[in-house]
Amino acid sequence: MCEPMQSDLSAISSLLTRIAESLERIAPPPPPAPDFKAADGFLWHAAEDSRASGRLQPVPRINRIPLDLLKGIDHVRDILVENTRRFAEGHSANNVLLWGARGMGKSSLVKSAHAEMVAAGFPLKLIELHREDIESLPALMNLLRPAPFRFILFCDDLSFDAGENSYKSLKAVLDGGIEGRPDNVLFYATSNRRHLLPRDMMENERSTAINPHEAVEEKVSLSDRFGLWLGVHKCSQDDYLAMIDAYAAHFGLEYPNDQLHHEALEWSTTRGSRAGRVAWQFVNDLAGRLGKRIG
């Protein structure tokens, strides 16, 4: 009776082996390792299927402007560039949250600081990911950890609304979890909100929680994971006109200075704001009227 049982077990084992080999043949091949030498910047595309890996898309030409054209944010600029330089040189550096007024060059500052490091010869890579892909950060970290480069992960306009839990994934990444954040990775984010959460969401947590302080603290603590908080505020009229002058000089736009300032202020009045983005839009309009193309 033992011989038939052994024969059956052998047949089952053989069948399972054939099934396993068949599954290996039809399984998709693993994604190729990213070629980090292909570009200085990449876009991260998270996989739609949680069982698959995301991919990094090289960006041949990063959309940015020279660092010295960013006016009115000199102090913040210097701190960010110094932090980025320390990281690029292999020293300790902090994750950074740039928060504050819209259109004042927060995202431009990150890209321009990275450009400064590349121009200085540092093999620093900039990887942009969308807020919606925050939950895929662990998979991205696994790709970057063994790479012989240093990386700044950049998330523009980061914020979280009621009912979202993806901020917990970001907290784990910033804290490092059990594995620890890779030594070759730093996280930079921009936001219009200092605590990344809308005020009404925080107030709602206070009013409905059993322990209001703990409920709010659990969410607000996300911003505490950033070692540097750099506030960018609305600019003065002088700073706004300095931006206009710098752009006009950089792009060789010859225009009477008094008229340039008058039209620039009129433009800002129609937009209801004085900011770097508004200055850029005015100069872009002016260039078009002068028959030139910038950017």
Image: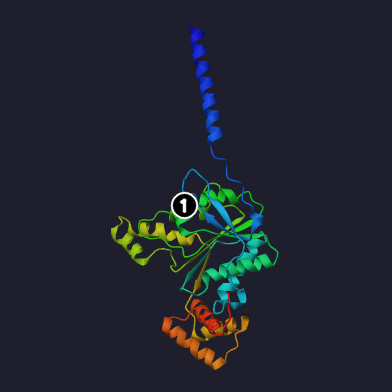
| Classed neighbour count for the residue bearing mark 1: other residues with Cα under 10 Å, few (<14), some (14–19), many (≥20) | some
Instruction: List the residue tagged with mark 1.
Output: 135
Q: Is residue 268 left or right of residue 60?
A: left
Pick the front one: 78 or 109: 109
Asked if 185 appears above or below 31 in the picture, the reply is below
Residue drawn at x 52%, y 32% as measured from the top left: 23
Pick the front one: 85 or 67: 67
- Mark 1, secondary structure of its residue: helix
Residue drawn at x 50%, y 86% as measured from the top left: 264
Residue at far left of view: 208
Look at the image and name its color scheme: rainbow
Residue 96 makes an appearance in the image: yes
Amino acid type, callout 1: Glu
Q: Is residue 275 left or right of residue 215?
A: right
Asked if 276 appears above or below 130 in the picture, the reply is below
Residue drawn at x 62%, y 83% as measured from the top left: 252
Q: Quadrant of residue 108?
A: bottom right
Q: Position of residue 166 (x, y in %)?
A: 43, 54
Q: Quadrant of residue 112?
A: bottom right
Q: Position of residue 238 (x, y in %)?
A: 52, 86
Residue 91 makes an appearance in the image: no
Q: Position of residue 250 (x, y in %)?
A: 62, 81
Residue at far front of view: 291
Pick the front one: 5 or 216: 5
Q: Position of residue 234 (x, y in %)?
A: 47, 78
Looking at the image, how many numbered discs can be counted on the residues?
1
